[in-house]
Amino acid sequence: MRPCRSDLVRKMEEKMKLALIQSELIWGNVVENVRRLDEKMSGCRGCDVVLLPEMFASGGMVVKKSPEAAVAEKKSVASRYEDVRRKMSEWSQRCDAVVAGSTVCEENGRYYNRLVMAFPDGGYAYYDKRHCFRMGGENEHFSSGDKRLTFEYKGVKIAVFVCYDLRFPVWCRNTEEYDIAVFVANWPKSRREVWKTLLKARAIENQAFVAGVNCVSTDDNGVAYAGDSMVVDARGQVLGIAGEFREEVLVVDCNMADLHDFRSKFSVLDDRDVFQIRY
């Protein structure tokens, strides 16, 4: 029997503290990116969930690169997957928090933009990005995932997505009563208003907290990333937003009791359209 909402509230933490690490990425340099993030972990102690940008170990992989260069780079980063995952596990245990971020993974000759969640007990889970960004050629080099992932931590249900997934409300639809939706991204400055608008939209329509973490830097093609990492509540109100064009560890408390009280009084989710997603 599925527990009622009041049971869920009693079991979950009253507040969940999120840390969004808005970091500059050095494109293609796994060692330096990991070293810099290692230093930033000290600012995440006492948090429950630590979020890293998309492709946090390497930066974006294939935008405007020659086919040969893109293949060589993704193979190089994928060869470090286990090292990166072990480092995430180390960070998770050091901070006593879930640590989430995406990197390149190779399985059976296929490459995935894989969002890894490392847990303090040494376990991990993963989600493979569903929507590969075709305008940047990502779909030509990476395979799409076909499964959503929602996990529970400290009684809070968390759904995870990657960057371009943000544009697809059906894929993000809250059919599993998640409390927080997480989006890790490399989202360029040229579309920053779209980023902010869609994060609010996903929060409002799904009656959930939404956290979006982005990078800051300029990639090898001269594309700039402004950051705008933010957390939005179910009413669409911004609870915290990182400064533009600068590195920052944004820490935000999400009040779970307030979320479930709002849902019970304004029960939009009870009228949502629920249907099977087919592939």
Image (cartoon, rainbow, N blue to C red):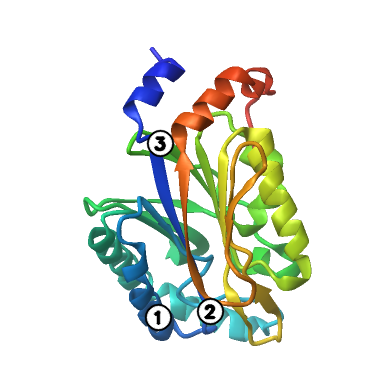
Residue 24 image label: 2
Earlier along the polypeptide chain: callout 3 or callout 1? Answer: 1
Residue 46 is left or right of residue 55, and the answer is: left
Q: Residue visible at 76% across and 58% down?
A: 194
- Residue type for callout 1: Arg
In the picture, the quarter occupied by the C terminus is top right
Return the x and y of residue 96 as percentages of the image width and height.
26, 55
| In this view, 124 is above or below 242 | above
Foreground of the two, 160 or 72: 160
- Hey, which quadrant is residue 204 in on the image? top right
Nearest to the observer: residue 68 or residue 46: 46
- Which of the 4 image quadrants contains residue 164? bottom right
Query: Which quarter of the image is occupied by the N terminus?
Result: top left
In depth, the one of 46 and 56 nearer the eye is 46
CA separation in Å, label 3 and label 1: 29 Å
Give the farthest residue toward the top.
1
Position of residue 22 relative to residue 175, above or below, is: below
Amino acid type, residue under disc 2 in the picture? Glu
Instruction: Estimate how packed mark 3 is, as few (under 14), some (14 to 19) or many (20 or more) residues with alpha carbons within 10 Å.
Output: some
Residue highlighted by disc 1: 36
Are the residues tagged 1 and 2 within 8 Å (C-beta)?
yes
In the rendered structure, which amino acid carries the disc numbered 3? Val
Residue of label 3? 156
**Mark 2 / mark 3, whichever is N-terminal:** 2
Residue toward you, 69 or 235: 235
Q: Is residue 204 above or below residue 95?
A: above
Gap between marks 2 and 3, in whole Å? 30 Å
Give the residue at x 67% y 42%.
236
The circle on residue 277 is none
